Amino acid sequence: MSKTAQTDSRFLTIEQLADRYQVSAQTVRDWRRLGTGPVVTKIGGLVRFALADVTAWESQRREASA
């Protein structure tokens, strides 16, 4: 398996995603509740964020500088 495939299959917890953006875990939970955050994957009842979904979500939020 290539390194890219391994990276794309990684999952982040709510806390790890919060750390990535320097926000609270509650903010990430709010994004989830409001449907404004990255796509969620539930694994055995645990909430996880696929890194590929996180990077796609980031790309959708890019803005050109004025």
Image: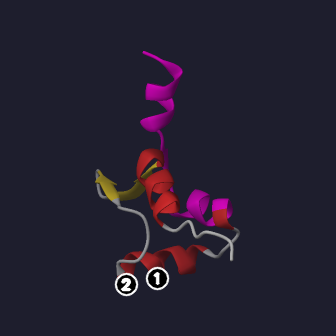
- Secondary element at tag 1: helix
- Secondary element at tag 2: helix
Identify the disc placed on residue 4: none
Residue 9 sits inside the magenta stretch: yes
Disc 1 packing (10 Å; few <14; some 14–19; many ≥20): few
Measured as percent of width and height from the top left, residue 4 is found at 50, 27
- Circles 2 and 1, Cβ within 8 Å, touching? The answer is yes
Query: What amino acid type is highlighted by mark number 2?
Result: Leu
Query: What amino acid type is highlighted by mark number 1?
Result: Asp
User: Residue 8 is drawn in which quadrant?
Assistant: top left
| Residue extending furthest toward the top | 1
Measured as percent of width and height from the top left, residue 59 is found at 50, 58
Horizontal side of 26 relative to 56 (left or right) equals right
Does residue 27 lie above or below 1 as drawn?
Answer: below
Horizontal side of 27 relative to 29 (left or right) equals right
CA separation in Å, label 2 and label 1: 6 Å
Q: Residue at x 28, y 51 (%)?
A: 44
Horizontal side of 52 relative to 23 (left or right) equals left
* Residue linked to disc 1: 30
Horizontal side of 66 relative to 53 (left or right) equals right
Measured as percent of width and height from the top left, residue 46 is found at 36, 57
* Residue linked to disc 2: 34
Report how many numbered discs are placed on residues in the image: 2
Q: Looking at the rendering, in which quadrant would you find the C terminus?
A: bottom right
- Which sits in the foreground, 14 or 52? 52
Q: Looking at the rendering, in which quadrant would you find the N terminus?
A: top left
- Which sits in the foreground, 3 or 41? 3
Residues in magenta, as a range: 1-20
